[in-house]
Amino acid sequence: MGDSPDTFDDEAGEGEAAPTAAELEAAGQSAMFGGDPEPAPAPPAPPPPVAAAPAQPYRVLARKYRPQTFSQLIGQDAMVQTLANGIKRERLAHAFLMTGVRGVGKTSTARLIAKALNCVGPDGQGGPTIDPCGVCEPCVAIAEGRHIDVIEMDAASHTGVDDVREIIEAVRYAAVSARYKIYIIDEVHMLSRNAFNALLKTLEEPPAHVKFLFATTEADKLPVTVLSRCQRFDLRRIDAPLLASHFAWICQEEQVGAEDEALAMIAAAAEGSVRDGLSILDQAIAHADLAGDGKVTAVQVQEMLGLADKSVQRRLYGALLAGDGAGLLDLVAQQFALGVEPLALLRGCMELTHRTAVAQLGQGAGDAVSAEEREAIEGWAKGLSAGQLHRLWQLLLKGFDEVRTAPDPLVAAQMALLRVMHASDMPDPGTLAKKLEELAARPAPAASADPASPASASAAPPWEALVSSVENSGQLRVGQIMRDWVRVVAIGQAELTYSLAPGYAGDPSPELRDALLKATGERWQVELSQLEGAPSLRELLEARQAAEAAAQRRNPLVEATLAAFPAAEFVKEDEVVPLERGNRNWSRN
């Protein structure tokens, strides 16, 4: 009992743990009262530490669902069939060029071709195949971007001839572990001209173990000498219905609910690009999570992308065609308050105009999202003429350009839509030209030869009567401009849309506006248009004179005279002067 702790430790022996306080107390009790000491209960062993699973970084949908086989590459069936036939027949080109817009799968296709050419199968005995196994070492290494014989180069950052020389030097050596040494050059159009020239010879006659795979969004920038040495595949834009179906499958894999209309909106916004669509879908899923229910809805996608509701688009387009200006402005204001961009409103009207024009040709409205939309488009197709639709398109296109550059897009959109509404019932240029020709062909009344008289003005074409009114008000210069240069596109109650005949420089709209105000006492809306209007009064007069001259030349007497005197010329009556003493000439010329 008098042993010190140091002595006790020495007796405990090397490697043994020192007795605990509970053990010492039990030993003392045993010495004082006898009996074997009860062993103290052992404390519970702590649970073994659980190794925390390493957090996997989030991968965006565009990378997670990148095609790993040709069967996963959507919308490019013709290219896949061509490659499959070439592999089966062992007719493989030495250089492939993939072109197309962003996000349709150009680089993915290049990697799939690299897999197809280098796959050895699960047993290591396979050959080139259109269905690479995905489990052999070449397939796995290529998918992970670490295969030593598959070299990817971004031409945007390696544009010089020195970068190409490195490739030329390396192609002489055989592949290390693969069947083919493959060079994938992305955005190949960024290479300099010298770099292309250095690559030409190697590209035309590469070693048998080398394949070149090029990808570009701008094939027209490649020299024709390069294009002629490649087997070209134009990857097409993906149709919106196919994109929507693909996005629905991805949502199912991600266990995310989504409305069909929402996916259709995302597919339309993607404009044929799978990658763009997946990026928008990623954003929509995140937006839906923040909303709380986790479902991607059409309303949320509209808010996220700043799109107008389809039903509102149809109501706005209907108000435009019905001439309901107040309702039109109310709808524009409501959509702008909800965050819809004015350009989106114009774009929606243009889309409905295009789909209505297509429906008139018997293509139907099969791409309509709902039965209401299909019924509306079919109704417009029956109620509008082709000329009206084309005029609507031109006016909307002009308005779209104005809104895009205007300092206040909302005001510009309101004015553009109102102009379209007011011009929708005006006669088209073809109809107006036909009416003018009919009026011009009518004989002038014999009651008065004075063009300024009321009878003469009432019998003249409407436009000509208006020009006469301007001239009678003392504005001869403006009247001459109207006669010689103005081509009427559309004319209505105090409204004039016109174009200019070739040769006139400047915009006479302010002068025309002032002259019409003085002549009629009304303020006119005058607009210079890029559309081709009806011929000017001067052009109509010249056309009539040419027709009269041609008719005169067909007269048998005139034909006989010209046959006898080939150098004879026609002289206008106002150019003939009386004979003067000593003057033997019959005309001023």
Image (spheres, helix red, strand yellow):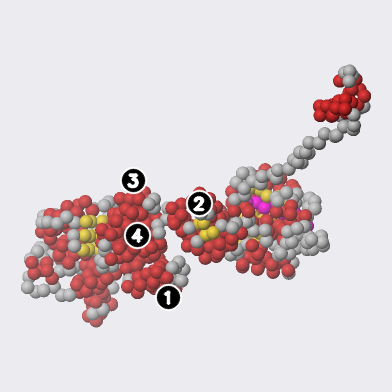
Question: Upstream in the sequence, badge 1 or badge 3?
Answer: 1
In percent of the image, x 7 and y 66: which residue is there? 453
Question: What numbered label is drawn on residue 53?
Answer: none
Magenta segment, which residues?
179-187
Q: Position of residue 344 (x, y in %)?
A: 40, 55
Question: Upstream in the sequence, badge 2 or badge 1?
Answer: 2
- The amino acid on which the numbered mark 3 sits, given as a three-letter code, is Pro
Q: Which residue is mark 2?
A: 292
Taking the image as drawn, is residue 207 in sight?
A: no
Q: Which residue is mark 1?
A: 362
The quadrant in which the C terminus is found is: bottom left
In percent of the image, x 73 and y 49: which residue is there? 146
Q: Secondary structure at mark 1?
A: helix
- The amino acid on which the numbered mark 1 sits, given as a three-letter code, is Gly
Is 381 part of what is drawn in magenta?
Answer: no
Gap in angstroms between the C-alphas marked 2 and 3: 38 Å
Q: Is residue 252 left or right of residue 387?
A: right
Q: Is residue 376 above or below residue 330?
A: below
User: How many labels, in total?
Assistant: 4
Q: Which residue is mark 4?
A: 396
Taking the image as drawn, is residue 407 in sight?
A: yes
Q: Position of residue 429 (x, y in %)?
A: 28, 67
Q: Secondary structure at mark 4?
A: helix
Gap in angstroms between the C-alphas marked 1 and 3: 41 Å
Q: Is residue 524 left or right of residue 150?
A: left
Is 186 part of what is drawn in magenta?
Answer: yes
The quadrant in which the N terminus is found is: top right
Gap in angstroms between the C-alphas marked 2 and 1: 44 Å
Within 10 angstroms of label 4, few (less than 14), some, or many (20 or more) residues?
A: many
Closest to the observer, 404 or 94:
404
Question: Upstream in the sequence, badge 4 or badge 1?
Answer: 1
Q: Secondary structure at mark 2?
A: loop
